[in-house]
Image (cartoon, grey):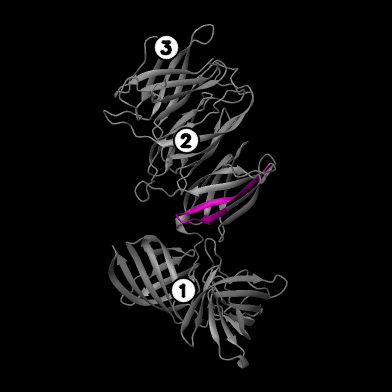
Amino acid sequence: MSPRFSRLGFLLLLLSSTGFAQTPPGSPQGKSFTVTEAPEGGNMEDRLIFTNDSQGQKFDPVDNEIDGFTYTFTADPNTSSAKVVLQLKTDKWDEFIFTFSPTGGGTFTLKEYDDSLLKDTDSGSFTDSRANGDGGLPASLSGITIETFETVETDTPERLDFLTRNRGREVEPGDVDPFSYTYQVTGAATASAVLVFRANWKWDEFDFVFTSDTAGTYVQRRFDKRVLKDTKNGSFVVTDNTAVLDPIAAGWYDGVLEVEDLSKPDDDDYAGRVQVSLTGTGGFSAKLHLPTREIRVSGAFDSNGKYQNTLSLRTGESVQVTLVLEALASGYKVTGSVLFQGVTYVVDGDQRTFHERRNPCSKSGRYTLILTGDGAQGPSLTAGDGYAVIRITKDGLAEISGRLADGLPWTAGVRLRQNSDLTFLVNLYGNRGSLGGRLIFSPVAGVSDCGGVLHWKRNAGVVFPRSMPHYYPTEIDVDRTAVGSRYVAPARGRFMLALPSGSPNFEVVLEGGGLSQAQIIPGKLNFRHEATFPAKSGIRLEFVRSNGLFGGYFTDASGPRAVRRPFFGAVLQTQAKGFGFFFGSSATGSVEIQAPAPVGPSVP
């Protein structure tokens, strides 16, 4: 009896024992066709093995030759025919028209091209080798299980589950080991596979000989620490793989929801958050944090890695949820969409793949971040710079705390994505505003170690600070350029910033915020990071060596009476400067700490 191989994860193999229906399959992927010329055409009997969705192999049993090819497959939706073009070389290809029979197999016509010229035309019949049980080996291992029985042992067999085109797991009593693998057809009934458990360190090599479509013999060579440990041989059987999910996909996923707006470019303007917990059998629970409410969803992904459902809420409203599992080079991600109250949100979630020991995050450490202001004052603009400090752990958790340029403190805990980007959305002002966007960790020499654009939204009517209700009465809805730097606490005898050793060795520059003109106040910083200023300058400045923050106050004498104005900020070690904001009379202004401008030679 021929098994029916079910494609797991995302690639579905439908090899029915009764053959194809009248209409052709959606794809020949994972199938093996034996094409036989009509008697008057010669004795050709080639096997076409469609390894994946774009590649395959052509095997000639007479000459024992194997040629690789790329292919395209086009089914005619109105007939039982499909066109398959096998590209063997740039100027050499075969063009098949397959007509599928309800009982399996069918007939074909063939045009052979060489040197880009039509060389021959043939016709005949074809069979699906696997479906007819004629001993054909699988074109792909994805979606099947191979159980191996070692010749010299009678213990429980070792089970190899091939879950996707390049991932699987080895199952033994009490032990499950994931692996990546490659598979190669080497002859009419032979194939090889390499199972990698640890790159360049531990792997198994298999040579398979298929005596039928469900059984055969094998030779296994096991390597550990790059050394051949032993060689085994025995028999194997092929069975259906009843698992529904690559075990590597199980775990937690974190991400964002973005409003679908095709009229605007993708600017990482997020509107919500998503979190998914996925079990090894495909079941999941998810939290969708939408702008107006939180929706909880539970269900299971199907064998194609997809979940789709329309949920009825207690309010009488409905929400349409589509979630899709997608494989990445380093793990999986969850994509899809959520339709609620007439708005479509695009789902973008990443699997947590960093681990303190097994896969430590290369971006771990401390950072300081500046949210650059407008540089000019306006009714809904801030001249000052917001700031934040970020601590990233080896398992990829980013702990963020900072202040926006209107003085609002904010915090967030976010997981880095597999590519080490940081995407987040945090609700502010009692859900009457938000801050979100994407930070990319890509160093720019002398400028930054990370950066991006964050979108800051504050609804009209929000009062903050409460002591200054006249601050920004209108809506704030702006993008802020974020510039970040790694932060390393200074060792003894070192400055936090690259400053000269003379006196003064730095200056504080204050602008905007209702000041009649910019103020530049020189100062002296010692190795204990104690700042001193000229007498009666009216300024105080303190640094936090552990995280790179600073704060203080200065005296604003531009009005009818002198006012002490507090300021806050953070240093960027990549630029050897500090940036922040101060509370002005009607808006916040900017504060900058830098080395003194060099004094050039006098001009006569």
Position in image of residue 266 (x %, y %) = 60, 44
Report which residue position mark 1 lands on.
Answer: 238
- Residues rendered magenta in the picture: 324-340
Residue at the top extreme, as displayed:
560
Under mark 3, the amino acid is Gly
In the depicted structure, whether residue 97 falls above or below residue 340? below
- Of residue 555 and residue 257, the one placed in the foreground of this image is 555
Does the segment drawn in magenta span residue 511? no
Q: What whole-number distance in Å separates the C-alpha atoms at marks 3 and 1?
A: 83 Å
Where residue 452 sits in the image (x, y, percent)?
51, 39
Label 3: how many Cα within 10 Å (few below 14, some 14–19, many 20+) = some
* Residue 538 marker: 3
Q: Establish if 580 lies above or below 418.
A: above
Residue at the spot 49% in from the left edge and 65% down from the top edge? 165
Mark positioned earlier in the residue sequence (1 or 2):
1
The secondary element bearing badge 3 is classed as loop
Q: In the image, residue 565 lies at what x, y percent?
A: 48, 15
Q: Is residue 1 visible?
A: no
The answer, for residue 246, to whether it is visible in the render is: yes
Residue, disc 2: 483
- Whether residue 333 is in magenta: the answer is yes
Q: Is 70 on the left or on the right of 22, as rendered?
A: left
If you read the primary sequence from the N terminus, does the residue marked by circle 2 or circle 3 appear first?
2
